[in-house]
Image (tube, helix red, strand yellow):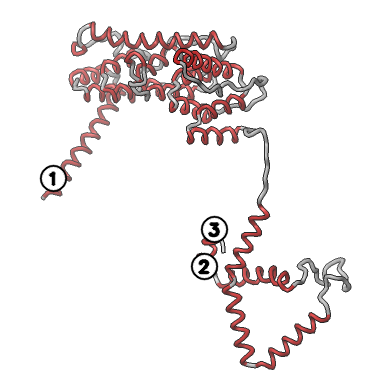
Amino acid sequence: MPPLTLEQVLARSMRLPRKRAQQHVSRLYKRHEPAELGVSTEWTPSTAKGSSLVGPALPSNGSIAAMMEGRHAGKRGGAYGSSAAATVASNEKLNFFELVEREDAQRRAGRLSIHSSGLLVRNSTDLTTYLKAAQRTGDWEGGLRAFAEATALPTLTAILAASEASADAAASTTRTPVSSTLPPPSAPSGSGVNPNVTQITAVLEMCAEAEKWDLLEKIGVFFAPAYPDAFSRAVELLAQRPSSDAGAGVCGWRAAFAYLTTRCPLPAADISVEAFNVCLRGCEAALDWRGAMEVVRAMGPNPLQGWRAAEEGDESDRTAAEASISCSGAASDATDADVQSSSPPTASASPALSMSTPPSPNVVSYATLIATLEQAGKERLASAVLNRLPAVEKEEITASYAALIMVWSNQILHKQRRRF
């Protein structure tokens, strides 16, 4: 006997109510007993419409006589006949699970169907499923190829072709073979699936996992005018880039900040302040308080612009921090120039305009800056920054700090009480 499947194990373990079990037993036995006795299951009763009393499907006289003889023999048997009937009934109940398994096998056999199609991705749902599967399996090349084939965007195809050409050029210098699986076949414009934010985010995350940062930046800039949330996600992924992968000693948050300030094609009204807060969180993780000050001053109108504290140090330290940001911005501009030379002249692929009026910092931005200053040991500078904030932001930050201090003191007091 073959091993039981999961459905069969669950069928054996379930306990049905008495009435429901009797219904299932009667239904199964009515279906299987005629087949075992050699009687056709397609016989219709005489009361049905259009039925006749003469036909090959009707039971014969011999079978009717056998049934009547068995019934009379059961009556003559008395108690012996009743005990035998009880034994037969118990055996039939023991075979209930066997009938359930047989029913499941027939149902599975009838459900099997084989369908082969050369077109795997046919709609947006198929594309989302395929991208998620490619992201889980790490097949970033297959995911990008499927995304380009499904969307049928010529500019995206040109971006992938330029990336593959640069990879081939690098491979020729190092004499290492590279599989040419990225460029998708050409497709007419407007005949593909309209991508959504989930699909673009999955593509960006696959590029980040494969450490294809230049491709991530190009795709983020291309889809930024129509999908600002995707551009913010690209900035967040660049901010999470480890310092070991970044070239020329530029850490992740600096590359993300340069990418945000120099290559953002969005108008000022569509830029989210959360993109700048991502850079500030990167500064907090790296304990780079100078970088956090520069990020806040590079944002919209705020009281920290044009103000320098004595605790910030001399001009050389400040210019060194600004020089690192400008170097990363120049590298991003050079990469963007390569994209524009290889891509067709479209509105989405036009040179990115620098932001004229970035969004102003919010309470989260100021709180992250103050937390970075405190963790870096600059308490006096943090106090000076807090005193220069507007009244509303200052009150909210002070209230949040007071709540944190109260929670912390209650925890310390609770621990001391537990000791005694």
* Dot 2 crowding, Cα within 10 Å, few <14, some 14–19, many 20+: few
What is the three-letter code of the residue carrying label 2? Arg
For the N terminus, which image quadrant? bottom right
Q: Residue at x 54, y 60 (%)?
A: 4
Instruction: Identify whether 281 is placed above or below 55.
Output: above
| Residue 63 left/right relative to 109 | right
Q: Residue at x 43, y 12 (%)?
A: 332
Q: Which mark is residue 85?
A: none
Mark 1 or mark 2: which comes first in sequence? 2
Mark 2 or mark 3: which comes first in sequence? 3
Query: Whole-Å distance between the Cαs marked 1 and 3?
Result: 57 Å
Position of residue 291 measured from the top left corner of the image (x, y, whole percent): 29, 16
Q: Residue at x 62, y 88 (%)?
A: 82
Query: Whole-Å distance between the Cαs marked 1 and 2?
Result: 54 Å
What is the three-letter code of the residue carrying label 3? Thr
Judging by the rendered image, the residue that carries numbered circle 1 is: 416
Judging by the rendered image, the residue that carries numbered circle 2 is: 15
What is the three-letter code of the residue carrying label 1? Gln
SS under mark 1: helix
SS under mark 3: loop
Q: Nearer the viewer, residue 244 or 275?
A: 244
